[in-house]
Amino acid sequence: MLVARLVVMKNFSTELLDFLMSDATDSAFLFTLFYIQLPNGQLLTATNAPTNLVWSGVTYYATQYGTWNKDTVTIEIGTGSNSCKVTVLADSTHYMPGSTIPLLQAMAGQLFNGAAITIYTAYMNTGDFGNIIGTEVDFVGQMGKIEAIGRSSCTFDVNDLMYRLNYQMPRNLLQSNCRHTLFDAGCTLNATAYESFFAVEAGSTQLLINTTTAFPAVPYYSQGFIKMTSGQNSGLSMMIKQQNSTYQIQLMKPFLFPINVGDSFAIYPGCDKTLATCTTKFANEIHFGAFPFVPNPESVI
């Protein structure tokens, strides 16, 4: 009866269903697989098994990214967001994929924020360790709040997508500045049409980026963003606080990984969300998402 109820809720392969309905489950091996898609496009896979496991052509690492474990999955009826706690045990020898930056340092630096996480349970026979019969999806969601982080461990929440129902309503308010973000669906402009490519030059830091090829006049790139296309920060983006000159920009926060001369990056202009900028800089006033002529609250009679 328990198996029949599970089948209604989850999609099992024929092989796994036959296994679950057999007596072999009394001594089966069950291990957890973690499939993490990071916001910068990188993939991290881990398992709590004693050795690496391979499923559907993907290797899940037992020790390369530390030890990963999930707590009890909380599921409630209704529209509330369900959650699952994940704990990672790692030290300074466990690195982010493709870098020499410790994994827990990357988590503290918010590089995992919003990561898409799928958690599976893998089944296998006790006498055939490593040969996964099938997997069951335990939880699908996004990384949420970090509950605790230290030198050797990090515990964080994984929230299912129902948490998005907490968005403020109504979404659009009467305001004088544009409600859209530059290059989003409301703005309609294509970021590719405005991107330019430069290389990091001498004197740069993780917060200040220099280039010998001149930028457009100040403040063209203020409040814009850059995306690194090579080096240890490849794939990572950072907001630009201000353009200091035609050869230097200052970032909102420093990149987590070291910046080296010759690292390449794409750069995109900024928008201060005023009608004047939308008209003169982007010629996009038809999609301006605000009401610039609404009087200030203290002026309303």
Image: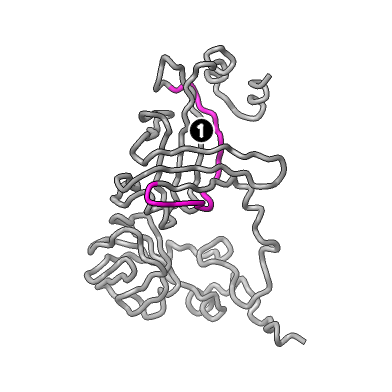
- Horizontal and vertical percent position of residue 172: 67, 66
Exactly how many numbered labels are in the figure? 1
Farthest residue toward the top? 23
- How many residues crowd around disc 1 within 10 Å: few (fewer than 14), some, or many (20 or more)? some
Q: In screen coordinates, is 5 left or right of 129?
A: right
At 54% across and 66% down in the image, what residue appears? 181
Q: Which residues are magenta?
A: 132-152
The image quarter containing residue 287 is bottom right
Q: Is residue 297 magenta?
A: no
Q: Classify 210 as above or below 82.
A: below
Q: Which residue is mark 1?
A: 120
Main SS of the magenta part reads strand
At label 1, the amino acid type is: Tyr
At 38% across and 50% down in the image, what residue appears? 104
The image quarter containing residue 203 is bottom left
Work out whether residue 153 or residue 281 is closer to the camera in this orientation and state it: 153
Work out whether residue 68 or residue 232 is closer to the camera in this orientation and state it: 68
Q: In screen coordinates, is 170 left or right of 252?
A: right
Q: Classify 301 as above or below 64.
A: below
At 65% across and 75% down in the image, what residue appears? 175
Please tell me whether mark 1 sits on a helix, a strand or a loop.
strand
Q: In screen coordinates, is 18 left or right of 247?
A: right
- Figure quadrant of the C terminus: bottom right
- Horizontal and vertical percent position of residue 99: 30, 50
Q: Classify 128 as above or below 8.
A: above
Work out whether residue 242 or residue 125 is closer to the camera in this orientation and state it: 125
- Horizontal and vertical percent position of residue 224: 44, 70
- Horizontal and vertical percent position of residue 251: 38, 70
At 45% across and 72% down in the image, what residue appears? 223
